Structure formats: C-alpha cells, structure tokens
Image (cartoon, grey):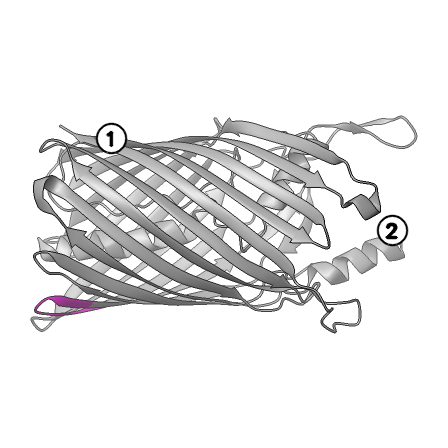
Amino acid sequence: METRRFLITTAAVLIVAASASNVSAQVIYGQPASGSTQFIYTSWTTELLGQKVSLSQFYTPFTAFVPLRDNVDITLYLANSGNNLEGSLSEELGGGTAEWDLTGLSDVRLQARHSFAKDRLLAAVGVNLPTGKRELNLGGEWLVVQEMSTNHYELPMRRFGEGFGFTLLFGGATMLGEKVKLGAGASYQYVGEYKPYTGYTDTLGVYQEPSEYNPGDIFLFNVRGELERETVRWTLDVVYSMYGLDKVGDTETFRQSPQMDVRLQGNHTGKILNYGGTIRYVWRGDNEVPAREYADEVDEAVAELSKLKWYGNEFTVGGYLSWVLSEGWTITPNVDLHIIGNNELNMDGSTVWGVGAAVGKSLTRHISVDGGLKFYTGAVTLYDIDYSPIDVDADVTGYQVSLGLTAAL
C-alpha cells in the first residue's frame, strides 16, 4: 500500500513537470471517486519609471478522479480562464492606457493508470482532446499570451488549446530497507499539429493563412528517493527533460533547450503542528535552431537570437507551518523566495518573495473547502544593450486569492 502511494507520486512528478499548469497529479491510495473545483484570481503589476503593465487572471479548473478497481483509475482535467492585460504610460510620456483580453477553455485531459507486479510497476496513458481555445488573433490575444509567458509570474494557467495529443508513462518503485524508497519513471508526450493564431492581411493587402504548428515531442526521465524516520520525511526528485524539434508546416524551426529540475523536500508530521520546506533548482541549456538558408539578414539574426538561453536558471526555497485545529480546521502560513538568473537574450533576471496563508475546513466526512491569500513583491534587474545593469530596477508586485471545494463519494 505504501509502495503504491510512493509509485503514483513518483509518476506524478513527471506529469507535473510536463504540464504548463499547476494542477496537482498526486492521488492518495484508497481515495474514493471524487471531484474538485477552484476559483483562483491572480494579479501582477510591473512598474518602471512610471510605466505600468498589469496582468490579471481568473482561473477555474475542474478535476475528477474515478477508481475503476483496486489498481486502475481515471483522472480528468478541464479549466477555464479569463485574462486581462493593461498597459499605462507615465505623464512624461503622454499618459493613456490600453487593454487586451483573452478568455477560453483549456483542452480536456484524460489519464488512465494501472499498477501491477504487486504494485511495483505503474503504466499510464493520457489523452489531450483539442477542446481549448486556439487560433488566437495577432492583436490583443497574442499580446496577452506573450505577457503570460513571463517566467517570474506565478500563474495557474498559461496554456490554452493545442492539437490532439497523448502521453505514455511507465514507472517502478522498490524498497531499500525499511525506511528508504526508490522510484524511477519515464514518459513520452506527443502533441499534434494545430494553428496557434488566425490568418492576417500583410502590408500589401494580401491575406496570409497561417501554417500548421507541430510542437516537438517531449521526453522526461525522473528518479525519486524517500527517507522516512519517525515523524520526518525527506524526498529528493530529479527530472530531466528533452524536447524534439518544432515544425511550422514542413520546416523544422526550433528545439527547446534540455532542462534539469532538482527538488529536495522535508516534512514533519505531528498531531497538531506540521511543518516543512522545499529547495528547488532548475538548470536550462541553450536552444537549437536547425541550420538552413535564410531569406535575408533579418531572418538569420532572429535565428541566432533563438539559439540563446531565453530563461535563466531558477532557484526556489520555501517553507510552511500548519496547525491542525479542532472541528476540522487547518491554518497554514507559508513563505517562499523565487530567483531567476540572467538569461542570454536580454540578461534580465528577477527576485520575487511570496508570503501567504491557506485555511481548510472539513464540512463533512466527504466534503471539504479551502481558501488562501498570498502576496508577492520583488524586482526585475534590467540590463542595457551592452549587458551592463541600468540604474533602476522594475518593481514587481502581485497577489493571489483562491477558494476551492472537494467532494468525494
């Protein structure tokens, strides 16, 4: 029983690493059929020399878990989000504001899992159904997506609709003595072709139909170790990601850099007081652009920029303290620090603090609610064209409000 819980958690690390959303994939062994939904509102503002850029997101996910039998289960995920981007200029630059919106569904994601060999092995098959919003217009919607990709923003949903896809996952786990568990897994993710944006009219007045975009396949490998001593549990996860070549039409255009994600967690469990912390480091390499003949010097210059490391390495450290109160209440304050190192494109890096608290309440044996509030503050270090720091950093602030409901049969 404990091995199966550890095995499913090991596989969940791969699923979360491959997903652009922050939806948890962990399922507790013996969990009955259940469904959950949340409402999360997130707001971010970046200000530099009187100029502001604000991004807000309403996010509502729905997840369901259905056990078909003792060692087979199915999970479902679907989400909707509404995003608003607003930019303002300082009075010195003439003032004024502009707004753009993007609202839509994610794709439906289904996954079936089966454990076997006395719960030492796990196989899973996932399907991505193209129900989400695609073919964004190249005006406001595309601008919103570009802002949502900002790395230091904590956003629950960054991805909308894609093409039909599937994921294959295989993992195993074993015990090394009474206190040490070791697991490993590998997954392959395929995403089919789709049109990310609508057609447009060029400067000559000719309508241009966009080509199909085919994202590169994704391969992930992970190792997970766990050491448990009385009330303390230590967990180490290492995930290595590899990406295939993206294509536009029949042309190979881009390969995302490989990535190494290392996470160390420690948790203490008591009758009334629980606490723990996490340290995480993400390493990224350089991107790849296939060699080919370019139409002009501009195309060649863009290709050279694409080869650089777009996002710097990341370091995150955080902790929580949770009180288990009477009548099913829990209160959990938490704090974290997220540092993103300089990249090779514009050398910008960031440092953001997060401070918040979550409250949970069990209404009945099968129904629970939770809520949370978190504030963020920090700065983005900007570099000039010669890669020297400028005198003023961009200030970053944000907050997130959440409310969730879980019901089990």
Local SS, label 1: strand
Q: Give the residue at x 71% y 63%.
A: 346
Q: Give the residue at x 72% y 32%.
A: 139
Is residue 155 one of those drawn in magenta? no
Nearer the observer, 398 or 346: 398
Q: Are marks 1 and 2 in contact (CB under 8 Å)?
A: no
Q: Give the residue at x 44% y 50%.
A: 375
Local SS, label 2: loop
Q: Name the quadrant containing residue 278.
A: bottom left
Q: Residue furthest right?
A: 204
Image height of 292 relative to 146, above or below: below
Residue segment shown in magenta: 226-233
Nearer the observer, 329 or 338: 329
Dot 1, crowdedness within 10 Å: few (<14), some or many (≥20)?
some
The residue that label 2 is drawn on is: 295
Image height of 248 relative to 258, above or below: above
Q: Main secondary structure of the magenta part?
A: strand
Amino acid at the residue labelled 1: Gly
The residue that label 1 is drawn on is: 35
Residue 38 drawn at (x, y percent)? 34, 33
Q: For this view, does 174 lie left or right of residue 17? A: left
